[in-house]
Amino acid sequence: MASDESETLVQEIDGEYQHGKAAFVKGVRMPHVFAYQTGFKDFLENFETRQDDVFIIGFPRSGTTWLQEITWQIFNDGAISKEPIGHRVQFFDEAKFPHTTQPDITTRPSPRLMKTHLPFHAVPKGTSDASRCKYIYVARTPHDVVVSYYLFDLKMAPLTGYSGPFEYFADMFIKGTTYWGSWTEHVLDSWKHKDDANVLFLTYEDLKENLPSQIRLIAKFVGKSLTEETMERIAKQCTFNEMKKNASAYWMMTRDGELPNYLRRGQIGGWKDSFTPELTARFESEVLSKLEGTGLQFGSGQ
């Protein structure tokens, strides 16, 4: 790999199947449209955090869009906005994408709310109390992640060039060669920081099971004092069905209809319709086995 890995393109190809082109930044495999010769590597290395910044972190299709909306509403006293979610809680990884429609993160007023798919070790960190910000990580059972991620990448094909069936994508997912790398490494990278004072580790399954209690937890973590009535209202407004009523706010890069909407089904356990017994066995032996002894569990959805 070249000394500046972001200047080198890599691509997974297997016969007629192929994943989108990628570039590595801090060892993380990113979509080439975000990272290849865009200046993102320098942007990441030089980004200065502020004490009241909040990063929402998660592997793709783990509930980060949901958490963006929840967190934004917590900071805005339960308001509802039709403004694109990426303009309100900006997608950090898209900061140097030449065709982005979102504002410049570096000039945004505080508090800045940002989402990233980068693993915890690669996300900007403050070096003093004045720049040490907060991180909310959301994890989801890998079975549901891989199905949702495949369907998302399939719809992203006009931008990435992806082609291939679910079995091909699932194999890449297990090997850690999809965008943003290994799911297991990504999740465990944040899990080991779950007890840090400035880190809140959540699961998609817990959010689905008891959204009001999770909203209280998030509000307390970010230091927002809200009335019980406001938190209950946010919980109602951030259910999947209610968010679908405002679906225009969740289009990928606001290019309505051309690229996928971030909202799909918002369910737990849908993976069972797509997995073969063989794939289930592979996930047990090659993915879930790596969680043994960590204490990380995903409840009934797994």
Image: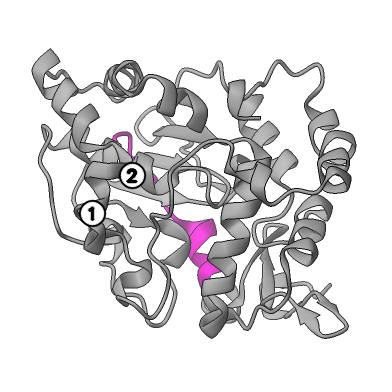
- Tag 1: residue type? Arg
Q: Is residue 173 above or below residue 74?
A: below
Whether residue 128 appears in this view of the structure is yes
How packed mark 1 is, by other alpha carbons closer than 10 Å (few <14, some 14-19, many 20 or more), is: some
Disc on the earlier residue, 1 or 2? 2
Is 52 within the magenta? yes
What separation in Å lies between label 1 and label 2 (alpha carbons)? 9 Å
Quarter holding residue 180 = bottom right
**Quadrant that contains the N terminus:** bottom right
Quarter holding residue 214 = top left
Whether residue 41 appears in this view of the structure is no
x, y percent for residue 233: 14, 27
Residue tagged 1: 88
x, y percent for residue 185: 74, 40
Compared across the picture, whether 99 is left or right of 110 comes to right
Label 1 sits on a secondary structure element that is helix
- Tag 2: residue type? Gln
**By what rule are the colours in the image chosen?**
one colour
Q: Is residue 298 above or below residue 26?
A: above
Label 2 sits on a secondary structure element that is helix
Range drawn in magenta: 39-53
x, y percent for residue 192: 66, 24
Q: Residue at x 20, y 52 (%)?
A: 245
Q: Nearer the viewer, residue 237 or 87?
A: 237
Q: Residue at x 82, y 58 (%)?
A: 171
How packed mark 2 is, by other alpha carbons closer than 10 Å (few <14, some 14-19, many 20 or more), is: many
Q: Nearer the viewer, residue 110 or 14?
A: 14
Q: Residue at x 80, y 75 (%)?
A: 2
Q: Residue at x 25, y 67 (%)?
A: 103
Disc 1, disc 2: CB below 8 Å? Answer: yes
Residue tagged 2: 68
